[in-house]
Image: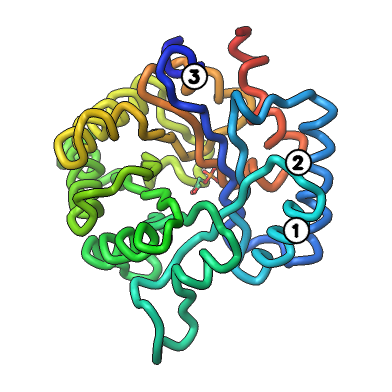
Amino acid sequence: MAGITTSTTGRIPFIAGNWKMNLDHLQAIAFVQKLAWSLKDARHDFAATEVAVFPPFTDLRSVQTLISADDLELKFGAQDVSEHESGAYTGEISAAFLKALDTPYVIIGHSERRTLHSESDEQVAAKVSAALKHGVVPVICVGETADDLELHGPSAVPVAQLRAALAQAPDAKDIVVAYEPVWAIGSGKAATPEQAEQVAAQLRIVIAEVLGQDVADATRVLYGGSVKSSNIAGFMRQPNVDGALVGGASLDIAEFASIAQFLKHVGV
Ligand code: 13P
C-alpha cells in the first residue's frame, strides 16, 4: 500500500473531480457547499488527502468566492487554459486570468480537448508552459486509445505525450500528471489497478528523466477513467498511483465524498 499514504511516499493523495460541461454557477455553489458539509461530517482530513473540483469557467469566480468566504479546505481548478498570454483570441481564457482568481490548478490536454478540439502535443506543451509561468499547477492529462493500446502497448502513447507536454517546461517543479486511458473514460470499464500502476510507473520515469528524480518523487500521478467508490481502493493501493481524476462520479456528492474518503475502503 505504498501509494496511499503520505508517510510512505511523501506525496499527498489527490482526489480531483472534473465536472466537464456540467453544473452552472448556481448549481456549483450549492454543490460545493454540500460537498464541504459531507466531507466535514465524515471528518475528512484534508491534510492527508487533498480534494479539488474542476468546474466550468463560468463557475470559477463563484467557487473561489465561496471557498475563500467560508474558509473551506477544498481546492479548485479550471478545465483548460489558453497557450497565449493575451490579445485577439476570442473565447480563450489566459493563465493570468486564472491566477487572478487564485486558481491553484488547471487541467491541460484532457483527451476530450485532444480529440474534440484537435489539440496537438505542441499546444499542450505551450499551455503547460503558460500555466507554470503564472504559478498555476498544470494537471497534465495523457492516455492511449483502444487502438493505441492494441498497436503500441500500454505505455508508449502516454509516455510520448508526457515527454511532449514537458518539452517547454524543463524547469517545472510543481506539476500533476493524470493517466487517463481514453477507452476507460465514461465507459464504465476502468483499467485494472495493475494496468494503471504499470503506466504510472513509466510516467514517473519520464518525469525523472526530464525534470529530475526529486521532482519525480514529489509529483502526484493520478489515474482517471470510470473511477468509483467501489474501485478507488484498488488504484490507491498501487505505489505509483497517488490519486484519481474523476469524471461522472464527481457529479454525485455522496459518491465523490466516498471516493475522497478512500482510506475507509482500503482499511487503513
Ligand atoms: P469518467 O470518470 O466519467 O470516466 O471520466 C474520467 C475523466 O475524463 C476525468 O477527467
SS state under label 3: helix
Q: Measuring from the top left, give residue 167's x and y in whole percent.
A: 18, 55
Question: Could you tell me if residue 180 is visible in this image?
Answer: no
Q: Measuring from the top left, give residue 232's x and y in whole percent.
A: 55, 25
Q: Is residue 168 above or below residue 185?
A: below
Q: Residue at x 43, y 34 (%)?
A: 223
Residue ID for mark 3: 6
Foreground of the two, 211 or 81: 211
Judge the density around disc 3: few (<14), some (14-19), many (≥20) Cα neighbours within 10 Å.
some
Judge the density around disc 1: few (<14), some (14-19), many (≥20) Cα neighbours within 10 Å.
many
Return the disc, 1 or 3, that comes first in the chain's sequence: 3
SS state under label 2: helix
Q: Measuring from the top left, give residue 261's x and y in whole percent.
A: 67, 24
**How many discs appear?**
3
Return the disc, 2 or 1, that comes first in the chain's sequence: 1
Question: Could you tell me if residue 54 is visible in this image?
Answer: yes
Residue ID for mark 1: 28
Residue ID for mark 2: 253
Give amino acid for label 1: Ala
SS state under label 1: helix
Q: Quadrant of residue 238?
A: top left
